[in-house]
């Protein structure tokens, strides 16, 4: 467990807090220590996960929870997470990322953070979307394993230990939750989700039933390699496969929303469609892109060359093959257009190859071209 329980008289004298008992009586280790960057790439052994040991003060688990106008769900959600993780003896941190809430969630989160040393909060300046909130959390986590979880109490934190165990047993790098029995409205949530999942499977080739489920478990190295923008949180399984991760799924519980209302609807299908092409390119062409661009430029180059020959030479049965005195305009125009297109494709391939090589270099050296992907959006981190 996370600290000694104390005597019965001590428990009766413990001060009350927003969470009930003051968590400082049970969680007395604090969270001010900042580990060196090279420690964050390590993964704990199964034995250390079972016994809650840490190395160099780095927690076993970071739970990243995007929050947007969830004031009624915050306290019960955090209580559910504590009840799920306390019995495991895992050392963990809770990282709440507020996406510009306007209902008082920020003020409540500040109070909770003062009472709970394992709770860290990140405040985004404006409402930037779930992807930006997750990216900010991915920049600031410290654990060897990462869990992402919705803050609306529809995901069940009790599934987290089971998913961690499944990840270890199956030697996976990412485990995605599968809400097989969704407790949502059919037209506004279930139907759009099924259409989006079908499209994502078809375009990316990653056979995950529920890519939109926020409840996922990752090894830290996978999160380090994910660069999220736009609405890319929906495509995390495909992006993870692109990094070389082994991805699996596990059926999880799903509850009806108790408070508030959903921020998603049928319009998200259009956003999925606009991002699918980008994800497909990332997944398929992230390694040696020059080969693909060069392969595409070859037919254009050959076609342009053929048209150039047709425009320059004429065949006469009496005189044979002869050079024309004047190159015909339509052959010349078509040939030049195809040649220029082939050259542009090849140059794009060179630029893509250079970009991939530079990214790989910075990944190997533990650096990044832009430190803190969510930094420009973050108001403060507490």
Image (tube, rainbow, N blue to C red):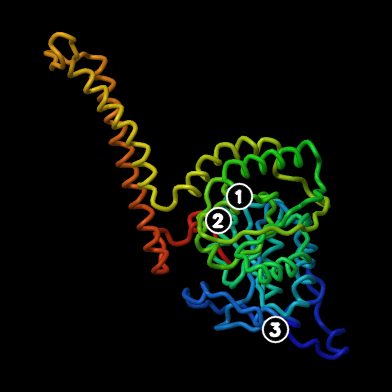
x, y percent for residue 206: 60, 50
Residue occupying the point 25% across, 25% down: 336
Q: Hey, which residue is sitting farthest top in the picture?
A: 318
State the residue in front, 197 or 232: 197
x, y percent for residue 202: 61, 41
Q: Is residue 168 above or below residue 253?
A: below
Image quadrant in which the N terminus is located? bottom right
* Residue 284 located left or right of residue 272: left
x, y percent for residue 69: 71, 51
Question: Is residue 157 in view from this perspective?
Answer: yes
Question: Is residue 127 in view from this perspective?
Answer: no
Residue occupying the point 59% across, 53% down: 236
The numbered dot on residue 51 is: 3
* Residue 73 located left or right of residue 173: right
Give SS at disc 1: loop
- Residue 198, picture quadrant: top right
List the residue tagged with mark 2.
241
List the residue tagged with mark 1.
206
């Amino acid at each position: 467990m996370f600290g000694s329980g104390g005597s019965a008289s001590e428990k009766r004298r413990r001060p009350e807090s927003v969470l009930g008992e003051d968590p400082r009586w049970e969680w007395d280790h604090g969270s001010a220590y900042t580990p060196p960057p090279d420690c964050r790439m390590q993964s704990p052994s199964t034995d250390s996960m079972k016994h809650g040991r840490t190395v160099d003060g780095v927690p076993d688990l970071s739970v990243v929870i995007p929050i947007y106008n969830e004031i009624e769900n915050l306290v019960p959600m955090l209580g559910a997470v504590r009840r799920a993780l306390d019995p495991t003896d895992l050392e963990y941190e809770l990282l709440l990322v507020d996406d510009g809430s306007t209902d008082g969630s920020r003020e409540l989160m500040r109070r909770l953070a003062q009472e709970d040393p394992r709770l860290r909060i990140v405040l985004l300046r404006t409402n930037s979307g779930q992807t930006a909130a997750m990216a900010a959390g991915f920049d600031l986590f410290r654990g060897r394993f990462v869990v992402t979880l919705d803050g609306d109490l529809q995901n069940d934190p009790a599934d987290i230990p089971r998913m961690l165990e499944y990840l270890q047993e199956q030697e996976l790098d990412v485990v995605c939750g599968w809400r097989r029995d969704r407790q949502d409205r059919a037209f506004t949530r279930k139907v759009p989700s099924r259409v989006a999942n079908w499209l994502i499977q078809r375009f990316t080739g990653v056979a995950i039933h529920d890519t939109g489920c926020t409840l996922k478990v990752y090894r830290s190295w996978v999160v380090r390699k994910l660069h999220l923008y736009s609405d890319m949180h929906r495509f995390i399984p495909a992006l993870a496969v692109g990094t070389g991760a082994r991805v699996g799924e596990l059926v999880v519980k799903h509850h009806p929303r108790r408070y508030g209302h959903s921020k998603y609807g049928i319009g998200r299908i259009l956003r999925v469609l606009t991002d699918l092409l980008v994800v497909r390119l990332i997944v398929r062409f992230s390694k040696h892109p020059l080969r693909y661009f060069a392969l595409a430029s070859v037919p254009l180059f050959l076609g342009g060359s053929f048209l150039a020959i047709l425009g320059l030479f004429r065949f006469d049965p009496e005189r044979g093959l002869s050079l024309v005195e004047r190159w015909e305009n339509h052959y010349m125009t078509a040939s030049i257009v195809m040649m220029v297109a082939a050259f542009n494709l090849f140059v794009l391939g060179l630029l893509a190859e250079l970009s991939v090589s530079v990214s790989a270099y910075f990944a190997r050296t533990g650096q990044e071209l832009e430190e803190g992907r969510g930094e420009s959006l973050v108001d403060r981190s507490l």
